[in-house]
Each structure stands twice: as structure tokens, then as C-alpha cells.
Image (cartoon, helix red, strand yellow):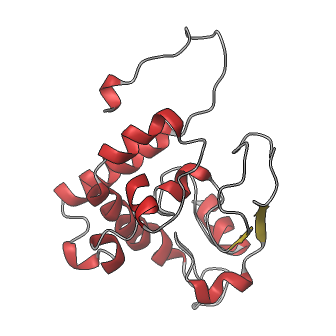
Amino acid sequence: ALNSQRLARAPGEEFVYSDLSMITMMHVVGSIARAKAYVDEGELLPECVRGHFGSASSAKGRGRRAASNVGADAELFETASSLSQCYYEAFARKFVFSRRQGEGGAADEFMGFRLPPSLWHQAAPTWNDTQSGFPGECVAPFRERVLQGEVSDGNAYALGGVAGHAGLFATAPHLHAIMRQ
């Protein structure tokens, strides 16, 4: 699907933001993590393996409307390997997030994708998705609530909250530790 993408405009004609490069990177990292056995099947999250997060179709399957800004990228999401996404999440959890736990904060602080609902109240609200016209994002609300503890990026949401370009939940000290690397 990625190889069939065509430019809508000539290079330099207009800047249009796209998440495709980082979403593609997520699948490349996940595929390599699987092929090189950096992560084994037992380290995958059960909800990922069961398909409870992944493509836009799984978001729709959970009764959620896909983000309106997914648009032409929806076909890419539909055909992308959700298994590589599972391996990407496990790789990041194993080699990035777990190594940061306890650095600059309590060992029980969460760092990763898909903040558990029991911790949502500890996260800062990121977006009021009850109003239209937020610059750079969806032109119309699609979740129709204030977002707190869940990814606000529409493409990352359509991917189930695990994406190469958005969706990380962490404390400021944990982010500082990553930036020091």
C-alpha cells in the first residue's frame, strides 16, 4: 500500500503534514524486532494479539468512528500489519520504557502507550473534542468528549493508541531521561 501512494502536489508546491513516515517506521521497527527475535511472542500484550488495537478497522470494530483526518491514509492503516505494531509496542516497552522506569520518578509510574484507564485521572487533559475547528486537527469532533489519558492524535487513535508518531504517556522526569540519551 505504501508503494502505491502518489504525491498530490509537486515537491515544494505546498507543505502538507503527514504521519506516514513515522507510522511506516513503526512497522519497520516492529518487523525487525520480530525477525531478529529482539522480542518474543510471549512479550506481546494479549490485547494486541487479540486485535483490540491496531488498524482503523479495529477502532471501528470497537464502535468508534475513525478520525476524519485519516482520509486517504485509511487504506494504508487497513492493510498495515497489526502484528508488526504489536512487536513495535513490545520493543519500545522492553528497550525504552522499562529502562526508564524508576529514573527520576517512582518505579510504579507509567511510561508507554495506552495509559491504563485506572490512571487516566492522573493525566492532564489534552483536547476538548466537543468543539470544531481545532487548528491542524480534525475539523469536526469525533469522540465528543474531553480527552484525558488517551491519545489525542487522530491517526494514533485510529491505530488503537500505539503509533510511531504519537501516543506516548510519561512523566516529565521520564521524558527528560529519554532526552538525555
Quarter holding the C terminus is bottom right
- Which residue lies at the image location 31% right of the left edge and 26% below the top edge? 3
Residue 113, compared with residue 130, is above or below; it is below
- Between 77 and 63, the residue placed more toward the observer is 63
Question: How far across and how far down the image is residue 146, in percent?
Answer: 76, 68
Q: Is residue 106 visible?
A: yes
Residue at the image position 46 percent from the left and 77 percent from the top: 98
Pick the residue in front: 104 or 113: 113
Q: How many marks?
A: 0
Please name whichever residue, 101 or 122, is drawn nearer the observer in this view of the structure: 122
Residue 55 in view of the camera: no
Nearest the eye: 155 or 30? 155
Residue 6 at what x, y percent from top left? 42, 18
Q: With 15 as the anchor, is 71 left or right in this view?
A: left
Q: Quadrant of residue 122?
A: bottom right
The residue positioned 73% from the left and 71% from the top of the image is 172
Residue 8: percent from left, percent from top? 52, 16
Left-right relation of 111 to 76: right
Name the residue at 61% across, 90% down: 118
